[in-house]
Structures are given as structure tokens and as C-alpha cells.
Image (cartoon, rainbow, N blue to C red):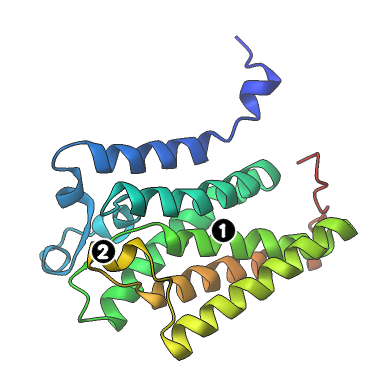
Amino acid sequence: MVATPGLKNMPWWTIAFATAAVAALMVPGATELFIYDRPALARGELWRLFTAHLVHYSGAHLLNNLLVLVSAAWLVERRYRSDWLCIVALSGTAIGIGVFVFEPGVARYAGASGVSFGLLTYVALRGLTENPRWRVVCVTLLVMIFLKLMAENLFGWQLVDWRQEAGFVTVTISHAIGAGIGALIWLSVVVRSSHGSRFEPASLTNR
């Protein structure tokens, strides 16, 4: 049985990630099992380094993260499908390790915003070699990512909304690490293409 083109082109990885995030919020006990928990990590529960990105503190937190994550993940999977898993796995794990090493005061961490930064940075950098209209979008996106990171890391800026009500703050290093991983994976693509692998920028309609 051969899958139809429509089903084959569906962003299955993105759908699976979003579904897992919803399930982590809805299934009793899932949050405590998967959240980044520093004492639990110290006991060897290393899966939490990655699974924390599936966990959210509330429906508003989940919706806020998924609006960005699904858009970014869909773009990467639709245009550069073979790179999706690498970006999500590496950025998710690197963020978990980074928070553990550089933020010893953070006992609990959850949310997919750092992974979203990795996906957005990657797709924006790849778009710099594509058609002019998409290139303008990608340059704008890179400027926005840079300004957001600078505002968070230099001035401690964060949105004043439901986060205050939830009683938690943004772990800004997660966004910086996510963006850094996205940039490193893009750089690896550039290096491979310069050593003989043919590099063909995607169009807006074709992978």
C-alpha cells in the first residue's frame, strides 16, 4: 500500500510533537514525570532534559508556545524535512543541559519556546539563499529574533501577560541556546554544501 502524496507531505513530526505536548498537560501525572526537575535529574532521570519541552504549566502557556512552535516546525518539516528531528533533538537536549549547568537556581523548567527559537533561526537562515520575497521575510525574522534575545539577556525584558499570573519567569538562556543550535545546524549545511554536496534552496511551493 502506497501513501497518497497528501498524506506523505503532512507534517507528521510536528503533529506528533504538538499532540505529545497536549497529552502531557491533559494526562494525570505526566507533568511530574516529564518536567525538568533538578533533584530528579541529579538522581539520574536524564530523559527530563528533553521531555521538559513537552510540558507546560497551563493551557495558556501551552497555547502560547504551540502558536510559535507549530508554525516554525511546520516550515522546517515542509521545506527541510530531513533536518527537523536533528534540530528538535539537539536543541531540546542542549537547552536542558544548559539550564542544568548555567542556571543552578532553576529547580523546575518547562516549555517549548527554546526549541521554537532553534527552528525559527534555522528556517530563517536557510531562507537567506532563497527567492527574494521569502528572503525579506527571513531577514525580518532574524532581526526580530536578535532583538528579542538582546532584550531578554541584556535588559531582562519579557512579555507582561499570563506569565506573571502563573508565577514563573522566562529562562532566557533557553532561547539563546535554541537559537545557537539552529544556527550551528544551518552552518553545518553550508559547510557540507561547500565540500561537494549539492545545495538547492527550496522554493515556497516545493521541498
Q: Position of residue 28 (x, y in %)?
A: 15, 38
Q: Position of residue 125 (x, y in %)?
A: 70, 66
User: Is residue 159 shown left or right of residue 183?
Assistant: left
Determine if residue 192 is in view. no
Query: Closest to the observer: 182 or 86?
Result: 182
**Is residue 112 shown above or below 75?**
below
Dividing the image into 4 quarters, which one contains the N terminus?
A: top right
Q: Residue at x 36, y 49 (%)?
A: 62
Check disc 2 and report its element: helix, strand or loop.
Answer: helix
Q: Residue at x 81, y 39 (%)?
A: 205
Amino acid type of the residue that numbered disc 2 sits on in the rendered structure: Glu
Dot 2 crowding, Cα within 10 Å, few <14, some 14–19, many 20+: few
Dot 1 crowding, Cα within 10 Å, few <14, some 14–19, many 20+: many
Amino acid type of the residue that numbered disc 1 sits on in the rendered structure: Leu
User: Is residue 77 shown left or right of residue 88?
Assistant: right
Q: Residue at x 52, y 46 (%)?
A: 70
Query: Closest to the observer: 156 or 190?
Result: 156
Check disc 1 and report its element: helix, strand or loop.
Answer: helix
Most extreme residue toward the right is 132
Among numbered discs 1 and 2, the one appearing first in the sequence: 1
Most extreme residue toward the top is 1
- Residue identified by numbered label 2: 165
Spatial CA span between label 1 and label 2: 28 Å
Q: Position of residue 104 (x, y in %)?
A: 22, 81
Give residue 65's mark.
none
Determine if residue 172 is in view. yes
Q: Residue at x 75, y 41 (%)?
A: 207
Give residue 119's mark.
1
**Is residue 23 shown above or below 202?**
above
**Is residue 127 shown above or below 13?**
below
Q: Position of residue 114 (x, y in %)?
A: 44, 64
